[in-house]
Amino acid sequence: MQQDGFKAGLKSGSMIAIGYFPIALTFGLLAKTTGLSIIEAVGMSIFVFAGASQYIALSLIAGKVDPLVIVLNTFIVNIRHFLMTASLNEKMQPETRWKKAVYAFGVTDETFSVISTHGEGRVRTSYAAGVIIMAYGSWVIFTGVGHVIGANLPLFLQAAMSIALYAMFVALLVPSMKGNRKVVMLALTAAALNGFFFWTGLLSTGWAIMVSTLASAIFVEIIYSRRGAVIRRAAGGREGA
């Protein structure tokens, strides 16, 4: 078992905190321009603690989408956390359920990456706590700082910041698309479906995003599964020959 404890976790988590600084700061600023109070913005970071979902929630709030739809979209975007926590459970030292529940809340893409790759053997709960507390604390604090900065911007800049929300989505999407055909297909399929729902008026904004996300994921996964089956059959045929 790793001997690194809480202090080592704080040190590892500080790298995540540095990375969170511009993202959380921007979230707080955009939350202000969207119309959220500082209590609402910081509260979202405290209780949700999921960057991509919080950004999506801002766009849905701006579109006056039903709160239930916002919750469902957040669930779908964060559904990958089931897999991450299940994987992390095999890496962590045995613990009581309530302790597992506490650190599972703090699992994000970044904290999962740091904790799961922490050396050989089991990882101590105290180390994971250090990583998560540093990441979580920085996200919440920088959200508040961003909101304060946003409140002091001129009104015309606050209005213009709504464009930055979409720029942020593009900045998150483009790097993952580079050299990955599956991600490109996912993005294009989801965009096409969402555009169809928007122009036909079949679904409202929130439901269109949710249905497009699920449908594109299922469609692309079916395509790649069939493609993989074809490749395996072809490889089996060559070996038989």
Image: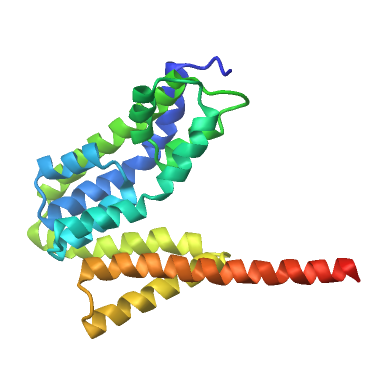
Residue 159 placement, left or right of 47: left
The x, y position of residue 29, in whole percent, is 19, 50
Q: Nearer the viewer, residue 174 or 204?
A: 204
| Quarter where residue 103 is shown | top left
Q: Quadrant of the N terminus?
A: top right
Residue 185 locus on image (x, y percent): 50, 72
Name of the residue lying farthest toward the bottom: 200
- Residue displayed at 58% across by 65% down: 179
Q: Is residue 75 left or right of residue 241?
A: left
Q: Nearer the viewer, residue 31 or 84?
A: 84
Q: Quadrant of the C terminus?
A: bottom right
Within the image, what quadrant is residue 189 found in? bottom left
Q: Residue at x 47, y 16 (%)?
A: 5
Quick check: 222 above or below 27?
Answer: below
- Horizontal side of 182 relative to 96 (left or right) equals right
Q: Is residue 39 above or below residue 189?
A: above
Across and down, in percent, residue 201 comes to: 21, 81
- Is 34 or 74 nearer to us in this picture? 74
Residue at 16% x, 45% y: name it: 41
Q: Is residue 17 visible?
A: yes
Q: On the image, which quarter does residue 45 sit in?
A: top left
Q: Is residue 113 visible?
A: no
Closer-to-camera residue (71/183): 71
